Image: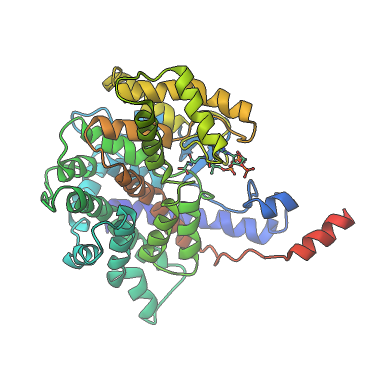
Amino acid sequence: MSKLKEKLTQKIQEFRPRTTRLVKEFGKVLIDQVTIDQCIGGARDIRSLVTDISYLDPQEGIRFRGKTIPETFEALPKAAGSDYPTVEAFWSFLLTGDIPTQAEVDEVVAEFKERGKVPAYVFDAIRALPKDSHPMVMLSVGILALQKDSEFCKFYNSGKFNKMTCWEYMYEDASNLVARIAPIAAFIYRYKYKNDEQIAVDPSLDYGANFAHQIGQVKPYDDVARMYFILHSDHESGNVSAHTTHLVASALSDAYYAYSAGLNGLAGPLHGLANQEVLGWIMEFQKKLGEGVEPTKENVTKALWDTLNAGQVVPGYGHAVLRKTDPRYTSQREFCLKHLPNDPLFKLVSMIFEVAPGVLMEHGKAKNPWPNVDAQSGVIQWYYGVREWDFYTVLFGVGRALGCMANIVWDRGLGYAIERPKSVTTAMLEKWAEEG
Ligand code: CMX
């Protein structure tokens, strides 16, 4: 057994009595109440999910295992010659909550080389799709194709299924999925946009660097990949991709079924597709502006109002939980300030950042007028030459796998039940409304 799995076994065993005690001794303690607008309005803010992988504070933003983004980057061992931690170090941290030693990271890096070997049938399944399918369809199909080799599913069908040990099989699938999703994404990139000229895995590289290599990028894109995957990994459990993955896995569907479904939710324009929408919005804006016309605060403000007056949302702004600038936005902005401060697209995105919150406040609808993770992420990709912006949500999907997979391993480790909230009818709501 790997050191990581050994450590996780110990952590899960130590943790179980906490959950058991809460249910047994304090099961009826009230932690929230539900109003009609929450019921109709997307269950916003209702406390009904449990996760210890990350927590999202509306003012402060995300903490992974109790650490802010800067603290996380600071604490984890870095990739050799790099400013950023390896994805493998972060995976170990998300799963266990402990900062791994370099030796522990090296073991995961080596393990991922084996786990990351993608069976040919995955590529066949993707190639069978029309080439103009959206890359998120290709990613979702690629992940779903892996299902036939699910260890969890085999264990379920073995007749020896056991609630206490099934997490170990989920862990195997989750680790394989995380190791394979980046090479699958790289395959999609080369298949769809680069004439199917594939680049072989470089076994000397860590996860982020190998992804950079496989899509045909050089340094410092390895750091872009590491930063990007880590920043997009987890945002507690209620967002569409994480919640879908958790929900599907709660039916004891395996990791592949669950994450393929999660990816389908990530592909929505109000969620992960917003990073593609931001680039689309900017390109449309520049086209309308015309050749040689400089973006100014005035014409950016006008374009924002045009979008709002057309009944559309400003992509990359607003959030269901956050009420401040997303620290994932800030983290990417800091990267831009260091590596591409004079890039025209970065300057335009910075100008949008200056005016959009004021416009959205004046518009008066969005509860949060500040930028989210998606407002900034496309700029970096564009700068380094990854300009096929319909691919950007795939990058999000690779990163999000880390959080979703860590969560469903723990879901099974702690024996969470099948999710099944209760529905009511509109007539019932009307009756309760009248009764006050
Ligand atoms: N532009 C225009 N209007 C916006 C807005 C934006 N960026 N954000 C919210 N609003 C509007 C909503 O559409 C809603 O309007 P209606 O009352 O007419 O339905 C109103 O403001 C209230 O919405 P809210 O409570 O502030 O926001 P929600 O929790 O309902 O939705 C989100 C959150 C992210 C879907 C929304 O802010 C949005 O559509 N943003 C743009 C898309 C985007 O960037 N999504 C990415 C989010 C991060 C991620 O998941 O990747």
Q: Is residue 182 left or right of residue 32?
A: left
Residue 278, quarter of the rendered image: top left
The residue lying toward the viewer, choosing from 56 and 275, is 275
Check the image and name the residue furthest to the right: 435
Quadrant of image for the N terminus: bottom left
Whether residue 30 is visible, yes or no, is no
Foreground: 249 or 244? 244
Give the residue furthest to the bottom. 159
User: Percent x, y for residue 384?
Assistant: 22, 32
Q: Position of residue 193 (x, y in %)?
A: 19, 48
Residue at the spot 31% in from the left edge and 21% down from the top edge: 344
Tell me where residue 259 sits by quadrant. bottom left
Q: Determine the residue positioned at 50% across, 29% down.
A: 304
User: Which residue is nearer to you in this view: 66 or 219?
Assistant: 219
In percent of width and height, residue 379 lies at 32, 31
Asked if residue 228 is positioned above or below residue 237 in the image, the reply reads above
Q: In this rendering, does residue 393 appear at all?
A: yes
In the image, ligand 1 is in what quadrant? top right
Eyeballing the image, is 27 above or below 32? below
At 36% from the left and 45% from the top, the residue drawn is 396
